[in-house]
Amino acid sequence: MTDRTLNGAIDDAMNTDALGEAEKLVSALEGRDVSYKDGGNLGKLVTGIGFRNMQILSQRKKELAQLSNDTVLCNKLDRYLEIVADLGFKKVLEIEVPEMREDRGDRFFVFVTDDGLILRFDTYNGTSVNASEVYFNYASNDPEARYPSINGGGGGMSAVNIETLEVRKNFAYVGKYSVRKSDEPLVEVDEWRDYVNSDQWTVQYGSVDGREFLRRNVNGLREGRLLSKWAVKPFLWLLHYADTNCPTCFDSDSRCFCEPQFKYDHDAITAARIEAADPALREILENVL
Ligand SMILES: [Zn+2]
């Protein structure tokens, strides 16, 4: 498969709505709109076909990721670390995750790149990647390319002077082509274009899941101009699973039934992690801390 065909196949897989396809199929058979919400036998049929579509789609994504030497949904730690290094990530923090029920030998990692990406993840059973997230400040002065080519993700948008890193306007990200001022109703993209002068840069600040298609997502982010010193701080989660789970009630759906109830201090843990990490992490964050 050529790279062009492979990329097209990945685009197709990413844009496939497994449940939507099931609804289309059953609607075509019935000659009227059928939804999985309808209940009854037709609703069940849509749900069943949709579930099967999802299984096929996730298998297809896994195969396409492997064909393009990319990460998959459930990654072995060794292979993941190889791809992470290949993308220019450098480790700035590695700590042990404290034992909960039993010692699984889990670790928590933070990596950064010279162009200002921050990757955080913890391990599962010591040998697989658990929760993983990549954080970024993506700048663009191209109205057609203000949102990076990544699969999903969330965050916000600001108008920024990228020489001084002065933030002029904050927007909340609503969808690929719709944004709104953080305290005002939705505006559509044409209004947004008028709102931000054409000589200004917009910065998308946010994060994307770091498990599946990490290489593809990082390459998509690098199509824009990444800020090696951030102008805006996205919601940054530098905690691992043991930070947020009660040591006594662990394994019970993260809920705590103790008296008093287990609480964690997000800000204090975050500050301690930044303090413990290589200074390269603080260099990215110093403008927004
Ligand atoms: Zn508890």
Image (cartoon, helix red, strand yellow):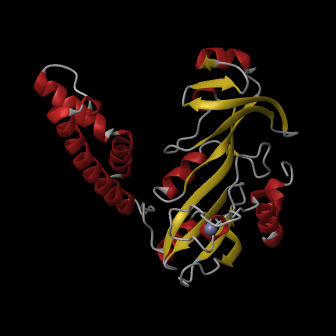
Residue 1 shows in this picture: no
Give the residue at the far left of this rendering.
Answer: 29
- Front residue of this view, candidates 24 and 200: 24
Q: Image quarter for residue 28?
A: top left
Left or right? Give the position of 192 relative to 75.
Answer: right
Q: Quadrant of ligand 1?
A: bottom right
On-image quarter of the N terminus: bottom left
Residue at 85 percent of width and 39 percent of height: 163
Residue at 62 percent of width and 25 percent of height: 179
Location of residue 91 in the rendering, given as x and y in whole percent from the top left corner: 68, 71
Give the residue at the far front of this rendering.
Answer: 259
- Front residue of this view, candidates 136 and 105: 105
Residue 274 shows in this picture: yes
Residue at 77 percent of width and 67 percent of height: 273
Location of residue 173 in the rendering, given as x and y in whole percent from the top left corner: 63, 32
Question: As displayed, is residue 63 above or below residue 8?
Answer: below
Location of residue 140 in the rendering, given as x and y in whole percent from the top left corner: 68, 35
Left or right? Give the position of 35 relative to 274.
Answer: left
Residue at 29 percent of width and 57 percent of height: 59
Left or right? Give the position of 43 relative to 165.
Answer: left
Location of residue 47 in the rendering, given as x and y in whole percent from the top left corner: 24, 41
- Front residue of this view, candidates 236 and 281: 236
Question: As displayed, is residue 286 above or below residue 15?
Answer: below
Question: As displayed, is residue 127 above or below residue 29?
Answer: below
